[in-house]
Each structure stands twice: as structure tokens, then as C-alpha cells.
Image (cartoon, rainbow, N blue to C red):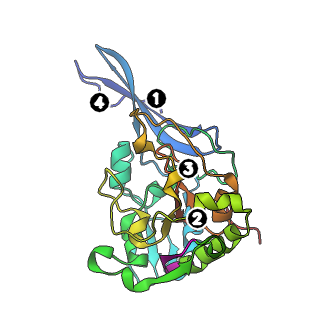
Amino acid sequence: MGEVWGEVSGSPMLSPQRLLTKSSTGAVLIVTTMLAISGNGARSQELYGASPADIKDRLAGLARSYPEWIAGFDDEFLILRNGQKFAISDGQAKKSFEELLEKPDIDDMFYATYPAGTVPRQPTRNSDPGRVRFEPLFVAMYGDCKKNGVAAKLRPVEWVPRQGGGRVMITTVNGVDKALAAVSRELDALPHDFARYLRPSAGTYNCRAIAGSTARSMHAYAAAIDINVTYADYWRWAASSAPTWKNRIPIEIVRIFERHGFIWGGYWYHFDTMHFEYRPELLPKAPG
């Protein structure tokens, strides 16, 4: 901290400071702020990629969440049961936010803490817990939809049948189908007023990238569901380039999804309030 990088006559001086920013939702965001000083004055540049201090706990949670696939980890690698190894860090700690999304390593997935159980409100800038995904790991588990490796693992799940929600197709890998079926049962038991937020579903499996990105969506693995788009708020629909957080989804719905391993896109700075994806590694360890 406090060192000067790239000090050259006529060039900006970059003074880095690593910050652990705690948002009003309770999410912790690991950011390195570079203060660039030039003839035009000072400006800050946010950089990402530093490994979280609790990375071993995070990796233990990752292995615990996907025991059929992950054998363990050491100081350098995440080790799959088939012998495949993924480097935990790529050694890059000066990524832009776009690079974080497009080219993450494994520890980048934990750059922001998912604020389970907190009151939803405007998140800290670029705090998108769960939106950063190390694609090779998810392809290894769920299959590559571009090579027809996902569709054969899907099964239909009755979606809030008491409310006429029909069926949705979801992956059987990692028990996501069972988790979503449990979500559906609990949601179906809510008062009828909640049904309007849940049906019709806006989709599950879709072999596509995140909008505006080359990184794959969790829909490409059939491990996500979007609920009724009529009551959704999405940052790309806003008139302003800087997302102003909005939400109409009742917190009761969010809590049911979280109990079964799903995270909610409404906790993201780049919010997507209809979106839920199966990411148990980002949720607190269940008691016992």
C-alpha cells in the first residue's frame, strides 16, 4: 500500500490502495483503487483480481457445494475428481471490471460477498456477487451447451402447479432439479397474491452469453430461472448508464430460493431482479 507505480515524467502517478468496501446490504467488495494524478487533476480507477483473505474458506465452501465434482484444493489448484486441475489465481490483480467479468480466475468468483439475509437496497458500485463465473469449472460440471452437452441432462419440474405455472426444464446436475422442485413447493404454499410474481416463468435453459458480454450466463447450464418478467427490474432497461437500483420482488420469494442454494440477481449493482441461479458456494454454510 502507498507505493507509487509507473512514475515517469509526464505520465500519471498511480497510487494503489486495497479496499474492503462494506455496502449498505452487508456485501463486502474487494477493490484496488488506483489514484491517477496528472496535469488534469486526480481521478480514481477501480481494479480487481486480488485474492480474498479468506480464500481457503471460500474454496472449502466451493468443494462442499459440488462434492461429486471437486476432490479438493491446494495452495495453487482446484482439483476435480477426474484429475483435472484449475489454477486458483491467474496472478492478475489489476483487472478492470470488464476483464473481471470476461476473464475471471477461480478466486475472482469471490470478489464480492453475497449478502444473504440482508435488507435489499442499492448495492455498492460493481458489487455483483455471483455474476463472475469461472467458465471452465461450470462447463466441466454442467456440460458445454455449444457442443450439445447440456440438453440431455435436463428434466421437467412442475413450477408452482397450484398457481398454474406449468413446467420448466432444469439440469439434474448437482441436484439443481431437486432444489428447484423444493423451491416450487414452498412458493406454492405462499398466499395467492405472490403467484403474479412467479408465473409465467421467463425461462430456464438458454445457450447464451450474458447480455453485452461473451461470458456465459448460468442459463447456458440450465441452472437458473427467471420469474415473471412483468414485475422484473433490470439495469439495462434503465435510462441512465449508472444503474439506479429498483425492485418489486417480495423478499419472501428471495428467502425461499436462498434456502435451497439459489442466489438472487436483485443483490447486484447490475441488478436483474427476476433472476435466480444455483450457487450454493456463495451462501452461508447451513448449521450442522
Determine which residue is flagged by label 4. Answer: 6
Is the C-beta separation of discs 2 and 4 under 8 Å? Answer: no
Residue at figure coordinates x 54%, y 58% from the top left: 55
Callout 2 crowding tier (Cα within 10 Å): few <14, some 14–19, many ≥20: many
Residue 193 is left or right of residue 246, and the answer is right
First to last magenta residue range: 165-175
Callout 1 crowding tier (Cα within 10 Å): few <14, some 14–19, many ≥20: few
What is the x, y in percent for residue 149? 34, 81
Residue 219 visible within the image:
yes
Determine which residue is flagged by label 1. Answer: 2
Q: Distance between the residues labelled 2 and 4?
A: 43 Å
Label 2 sits on what residue type? Phe
Q: Distance between the residues labelled 4 and 1?
A: 13 Å
Residue placed most toward the observer, 236 or 86: 236
Counting labels gives: 4
Label 1 sits on what residue type? Gly
Labels 2 and 1: the sequence-earlier one: 1
Is the C-beta separation of discs 2 and 1 under 8 Å? Answer: no
Which labelled disc corresponds to residue 262? 2
Q: How far apart are marks 1 and 3 (CA)?
A: 35 Å
Determine which residue is flagged by label 3. Answer: 266
